[in-house]
Amino acid sequence: MAKHLLEVKDLRTSFFTPEGEVKSVDGVSYYVEEGEAIAIVGESGCGKSVTQMSVMQLVQCPPGKILSGEVLFDGQNLLEYKSDSKEMRSIRGSGISMIFQEPMTSLNPVLTVGAQLCDIIITHNPGMKKDEAWAKGVQALKDVGIPEAEARMKNYPFEMSGGMRQRVMIAAAIVCGSKLIIADEPTTALDVTTQAQVMDLLLELVEKHGKSLVIITHNLGLVTRYASRVYVMYAGRIVESGTTEQILTNPQHPYTKGLLNSVPKLESNKDEDLVPIQGMPPILSNLPKYCAFLPRCPYATDKCRESDKPMLKDTGNTHFSACYLTEGQNG
Amino acid sequence: MADQKNMDAPLLKVEHLKMYFPVTKGFFGKKVGVVKAVDDVSFDIRRGETFGLVGESGCGKTTTGKCILRINDPTDGNVYFEGQEISRMTKHEFQPMRRKIQLIFQDPFSSLDPRSSVYSILSEAIMCDGKPRTKEEIRNKVNELLFTVELNPIMSYRFPHELSGGQRQRLGIARALACNPELIVCDEPVSALDVSIQAQIINLFRSIQKKLGITYLFIAHDLAVVRHISDRIGVMYLGHLVEVTKSTDLYHTPLHPYTQALLSAIPITDYYEEKKRKRIPLQGEVPSPMHMPPGCPFNPRCPYATERCRTEVPKLREVMPDHFVSCHKYEEEKK
């Protein structure tokens, strides 16, 4: 079994708002092995991004606060470090890199791409000469498939297309040699053909350079093609986890089933009506004591209404589901 | 012309539509170039069907929709609605047509007046035909519209900011339906919504069409959504319509090299099928519409490009029944 590069245990992050405590991340545990690509799937507001922000300790405090849990990266517990400590700053970038949805907001609009890349390289390699850093930046742009890399180094972000900017972000992630890349909706703002190019590039980093990748997305198609394991999140909790094959071909949790049924499929017979999940996503500041999916669940029983939130239980072959209905099956 | 109104005639006919935007520079607005946003696009939409328009950003699908709605006045070409040419009408002549062609936007929040309640948003749209109505008639019509889009009548006292994204989009649909339109142009109506809500809205579009027989022009970039909702689909690339076909044929027999690449770029959720699929990687990026390549717009990225593709723009032609494609490859094969 490969080493767990990142292991998150029972992470809890809340936001304290005038409306009350919002439990954005409510006891989330997951791990990433070395050289593996995993996906975290969920709809907006399910806490998938806040989970990753907590790992990087980028949650704004106040109103947000990481309450408890463990984030083990390469043997160290990151939560022992303060958010602005030297250790944490060195892990961001050289340990874990993050790629965001909208690359324009992550790049500085008044500096050239080259200046920004050199800045990153010199910060992580103190004492490096400027022209050395420049050469390294050019190489990184070549690695991510940007043509005419030398000329592109002198471009400002606005002179590049969306796909190109996202490649620059990936280049920034690889120049510091980080082992784990967290990609938060990396291709949502991109067109489909560009999306395929950017995702192929990310997967190449995993397969050829042994990096690990966490893809945060709501697009189940991306998951099928690029991830080997999947975690499905709903209302701040992981409701199902397993290999991509298990989740997509044999979903256990009613939410995963609903999600799969509500996506229009390119390949299927179009006359079938979509089966949407009824109702609306829950409001996180006012979650019930019982299972958060219960109001929308077509299979809910009395047991679900009377019991506490279900825990993740193994349904066989490391396929976990947090639902009372699936618990009995392997009982 | 205007008299031939039988049911078989297309509701909307677009012929050789061209929309060029000048690119200006400097204080005096010197013209330095032209962006061919829509270049020679022709298609027709039959009564009661859904015609999908797909393509990547900047391909001109929204501009095509805007030309039909007369938000943009096309540079050249004709648009016939119920047999009447509408692209050359004066504003005054077009006024009664506007009620028959309605629009639904992508972002339901910016397209709703934040200071009007649901009731006043809908009643304003109902009254735009200028007919006298009593308060009760309007109230009944508002309730009827809310019922059609599956919103609770209590909602009519709410304001847009109190509604969720899905509810706002339902309100947008209700407003479009308020003046009994024949055609609704839907511009990316579900792309801002979450997956589970998106499915609800797609089903709503279909049930409204079954009930009221409305025709849709459905513009979106998500091929899976468009294929699900449309009867026929037009694929656009750089201002050109490259393929038009029945949506059932699109996945299994795409003909244009761009359509094939586009389809293969989209990952599907069927796990075993996905692992078997062949990928056609596309090199490079979409060229800027200001510097269009000569010949076929797709030729710099096309794996089958020949000398002819680099010089001559292919025409959209029917290669199979109800399947149009603009590619020199199929023309040669036919000979």
Image (tube, coloured by chain):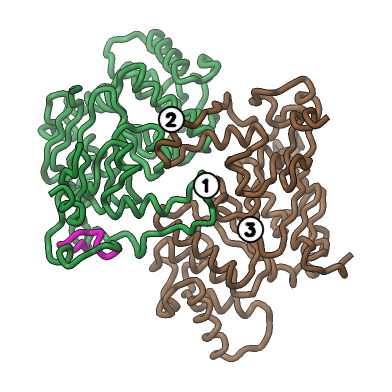
Q: Is residue B202 left or right of residue A89?
A: right
Q: Nearer the viewer, residue A301 or A175?
A: A301
Taking A240 as reference, is B262 left or right?
right
Alpha-carbon neighbours of circle 3 within 10 Å: few (<14), some, or many (≥20)? many
Q: Along the line of sight, which residue is nearer the eye, A24 or A315?
A: A315
The residue under the point 70% across, 68% down is: B98
Q: What is the chief secondary structure element of the magenta stretch?
A: loop
Which one is nearer the viewer's eye here, B167 or B24? Answer: B167
Say whether residue A292 is magenta. yes
Q: Colour of chain B?
A: brown
**Cα separation between marks 2 and 3:** 32 Å
Residue B200 locus on image (x, y percent): 44, 61
Above or below, comparing residue A160 to residue A42 in the picture: above
Examine the image and state in which quarter residue B11 appears.
Answer: bottom right
Residues packed near mark 2 inside 10 Å, few (<14), some (14 to 19) or many (20 plus): some
**Residue drawn at (13%, 38%), measured in percent from left and top?**
A9
* Mark identifier at residue B50: 3
Dividing the image into 4 quarters, which one contains the N terminus of chain B?
A: bottom right
- Three-letter amino acid code at the position of disc 3: Thr
The reply, left or right, for residue A45 in relation to residue B246 is left
Magenta stretch bounds: A286-296
Determine the chain carrying the residue at label 1. B
Q: Amino acid at mark 1?
A: Ala
Q: Which secondary structure lies at badge 1? A: helix
C-alpha span from label 3 to label 1: 14 Å
Mark positioned earlier in the residue sequence (3 or 1): 3
Q: Give the number of callouts.
A: 3
